[in-house]
Amino acid sequence: MTAPAPEPTSDQKQLLYFADPMCSWCWGFSPVISGLAELHGDTLPIRPIMGGLRTGNDKTMTQEAKDEIREHWEHVHDGTGQPFNFDFFDRDDFVYDTEMACRAVVTARGVEPRIGLSLLARLHQAFYAENQDITDRDTVVALAVDDGLDEANFINTFDSDAAKQVTASDFQITQKLGVPGFPTLLAGTYDEGFGLVTTGYRPLEDLAGPIAEWLEEKSD
């Protein structure tokens, strides 16, 4: 396994990004978080923390649930322009459980946060735009490999009890902090604490300026 990247120091400025691979508004926000990563590079690490939108579910989606989720997808498409493949709603046996996809991001993040971000974006695209089933282990593994991760190393870590525990810890952190929804973005340092940047979708142009000003202020 590639050696894990070092954690940010306690005084290093960073963004904490609370999201879920099967959250439609996070898919809408995907170009925004990618844009922030491109703007700030290594000066402002972005750590993805998985929210666990729906975990432990073992019930097949009802028609009522499909109708509700379709409405959400339509709102996200209208508000962000992100593409959606509505063939998803033709599935008859889909169980909406986000744990496996979240664990994939946590596994990738263990190598480096930016790799976790990259796989999160790939999972979003696969699920929402390509109608791939990211609750399926083989699909998740294939997407991770497609994103550049070593297959044997990824599987070894992904299937481990440690990965499951870290993923559960992400969910607990999200709940403990009272994160009200996804996406949620916090900025700060471990020394000084974190402040809210946004809960819910905001376009890049609304966030890039304030974050740049905050970075400049903190560097003075």
Image (spheres, grey):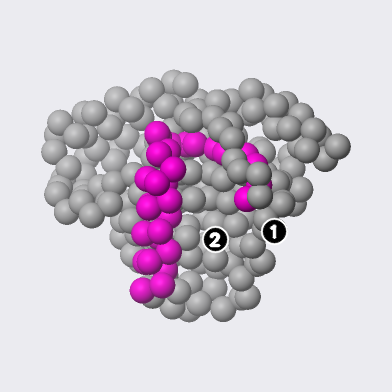
Q: Position of residue 100 (x, y in %)?
A: 35, 59
Left or right of residue 170, residue 30 in this image: right
Say which quadrant the N terminus sits in: bottom right
* Numbered circle sitting on residue 9: 1
The residue closer to the viewer here, 35 or 78, is 35
Residue at the limit of the structure toward the front, as seen here: 192
- Identified by mark 1, the residue type is Thr
On whether residue 172 falls in the magenta region, the answer is yes
Q: Quadrant of residue 67?
A: top left
Q: Residues within 10 Å of mark 2 (few under 14, many from 20)?
A: many
Residue at numbered disc 2: 109
Q: Position of residue 143 (x, y in %)?
A: 46, 60
Q: Position of residue 77 (x, y in %)?
A: 43, 26
Residue 212 seen in the figure: no
Element under label 2? helix
189 to 73, vertically: above or below? below
For image coordinates 79% across by 33% down, the residue present is 217
2 to 195, vertically: above or below? below
Say which quadrant the C terminus sits in: top right
For image coordinates 71% across by 43% down, the residue present is 38
189 to 162, vertically: above or below? above
The residue closer to the viewer here, 180 or 23, is 180
Residue 55 seen in the figure: yes
On whether residue 13 falls in the magenta region, the answer is no
Q: Which residues are magenta?
A: 161-190
Residue at the limit of the structure toward the right, as seen here: 220
